[in-house]
Image: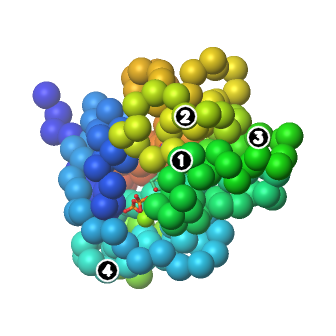
Amino acid sequence: MATKQKLLFVTGNKNKLSEMQDLLGDHFQLDNISIDLPEIQGSSIEVAREKCRKAAEIAKGPVYVEDSGLGFGALNGLPGPYIKWFLDSVGIEGLVKMLDGYTDKSAIASCTVAYSAGPGSEPIIFEGIVKGSIVDPLGSRHFGWDPIFKPDGYEDTYASMDVALKNTFSHRFLAVSKLRQYLEKELELRKSLAVME
Ligand SMILES: O=c1nc[nH]c2c1ncn2[C@H]1C[C@H](O)[C@@H](COP(=O)(O)OP(=O)(O)OP(=O)(O)O)O1
Ligand SMILES: [Mg+2]
């Protein structure tokens, strides 16, 4: 059997790592450096890009990171990339309460993956978004805001559905599918160049 291509994912979040393992483990040997990288103030793309530059310097080689967000329609996309600090401060009940005065409960879950071929190599961005709404907490509380995000077209929240189902359409699945396509093309290109040499 061909050896799997190695891929280094820098994240301090073990739930992300576990989902990534399910999403990429078939073709890639996923290694992990567990660091909670500093996050700048900016859009999800800017945050992910900076995390990735830092990660490539630390790893001294190819690496990828991701930044996840949850934005509320009623708040013009906030908290978005700042959801982690809102979640840590007010908890999931507090997040639901933030929308009490609004009829618009729409929300967008986003995953912004950034891949760099190594230190000094400009990160490439892959995005995945899923539209849904904010509901009262339902399901297991082990991963972030999963209990209050109900994707459109489903009766369950991310937390009350099987993670295997979440992984077939989630914001992370969509972003990672683009990364996978890119890496597979890159591998093919390297193989064809090796033949020409
Ligand atoms: O699918 C998800 N379902 C529910 N919650 C999620 C998901 N994905 C991230 N989350 C949470 C984790 C953190 O509270 C915030 C994102 O912040 P974010 O900076 O991307 O994650 P993090 O600091 O935990 O890990 P990392 O070291 O990769 O930056 O939303
Ligand atoms: Mg983070």
* Mark 1 element type: helix
Badge 2: how crowded within 10 Å, few (<14), some, or many (20+)? some
Q: Nearer the viewer, mark 2 or mark 3?
A: 2
Residue 135: quadrant of the picture: top right
Task: Estimate the x, y position of residue 130 in percent, counting from the top left.
Answer: 65, 38
- Quarter of image, ligand 2: bottom left
Which three-letter amino acid code belongs to the residue tagged 4? Glu
Residue 10: quadrant of the picture: bottom left
Which three-letter amino acid code belongs to the residue tagged 2? Pro
* Mark 4 element type: helix
Give the distance between the C-alpha atoms of the residues marked 4 and 2, in whole angstroms: 39 Å
Q: Nearer the viewer, mark 4 or mark 2?
A: 2
Give the distance between the C-alpha atoms of the residues marked 3 and 1, in whole angstroms: 16 Å
Label 2: which residue?
Answer: 137
Give the distance between the C-alpha atoms of the residues marked 2 and 1, in whole angstroms: 7 Å
Which three-letter amino acid code belongs to the residue tagged 1? Ile
Q: Nearer the viewer, mark 3 or mark 1?
A: 1
Identify the mark at residue 106; answer none if there is no mark.
Answer: 3
Task: Estimate the x, y position of residue 190 in percent, counting from the top left.
Answer: 35, 53
Whether label 2 lies within 8 Å of ligand 1 gets the answer no
Task: Estimate the x, y position of residue 185 in percent, counting from the top left.
Answer: 45, 45
Tell which circle, 4 or 1, labels the residue nearer the N-terminal end: 4
Q: Where is 152 relative to 7, above or below?
A: above
Q: Are marks 2 and 1 in contact (CB under 8 Å)?
A: yes
Identify the mark at residue 92; answer none if there is no mark.
Answer: 1
Give the distance between the C-alpha atoms of the residues marked 4 and 3, in whole angstroms: 38 Å
